Image (tube, rainbow, N blue to C red):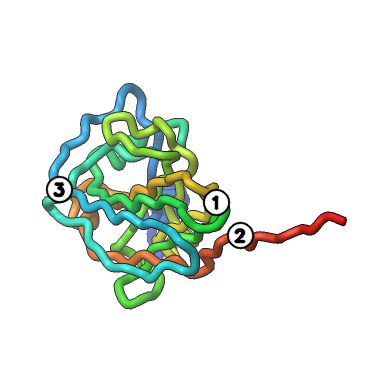
Amino acid sequence: MNLRRIPPALAVLLLAVTPAIAQKVDFAQKGPAAPPVIDASEDFPLNYLGGEPPLFTAALDADDSTYNRAVSCASLSGVGTAVAYDTLTITNNSAGTANFVVFSSMVGGGACAGAPDTFFTLYDTSFNPAAPLTNCLAVNDDINGSANRCSTLTFAIPLGQTRVVVLSAFDNASVPAGLFDYQVNFTGTTPVELVSFSGQ
């Protein structure tokens, strides 16, 4: 585009608006959550006994349930009102507290440069799609903005407790970018080492 042939006021307007068009926008909605549609989302249960769990691949597809995801643990998204989701339910049965690192990537590895564009929400003990802010502990949208639209969470699970990671799309399932294959990785996950002390 040759800005020298455009009136100065219009050129300033175009320069101000054009970068925003390329940006992903999310905002908090007012009012209650959009009701979930319960279909056949996959749950991936993980009975954690120690070590680094193996990665797995899955898909957000047309037969998955949908829900109104959070934009933060205090508010619901006005954009992701009917996102497809799967769940990862982790129960820590190792020797002590476990430190988890969970992140998504393209199938086969690599950053998400567009789709998949994942969104992670962490819940304490259980997840109810009809009450998506209840038990919410943390959210993560992008690892590195537009350079990597994959998501990551780092959290500790005390012995005997359960956390649920909801793996969803950023966009609604009705949008082409809202359904895709993805990979989940646990690189960096470690149990806390137990230290023994002996008294004199």
Residue 2 placement: quadrant: bottom left
Q: Residue at x 42, y 41 (%)?
A: 123
Horizontally, is 37 left or right of 101 in the view?
left
Return the mark for residue 18: none
**Can you identify the residue that label 1 sits on?**
156
Q: CA distance from mark 1 to mark 2?
A: 9 Å
Label 2 sits on a secondary structure element that is: loop
Q: Are marks 1 and 2 in contact (CB under 8 Å)?
A: yes
Q: Mark 1 vs mark 3: which is more N-terminal? A: 3
Farthest right residue in view: 200
**Can you identify the residue that label 3 sits on?**
40
Point out residue 62 in the picture as x, y percentages from the top left corner.
Answer: 12, 53
Q: Is residue 55 visible?
A: yes
**Can you identify the residue that label 2 sits on?**
192
Farthest front residue in view: 200
Q: Residue at x 72, y 60 (%)?
A: 196
What amino acid is at disc 2? Answer: Val
Q: Are marks 3 and 2 in contact (CB under 8 Å)?
A: no
- In this view, the mark in front (1 or 3): 1
What amino acid is at disc 1? Answer: Ala
Q: Is residue 1 visible?
A: no
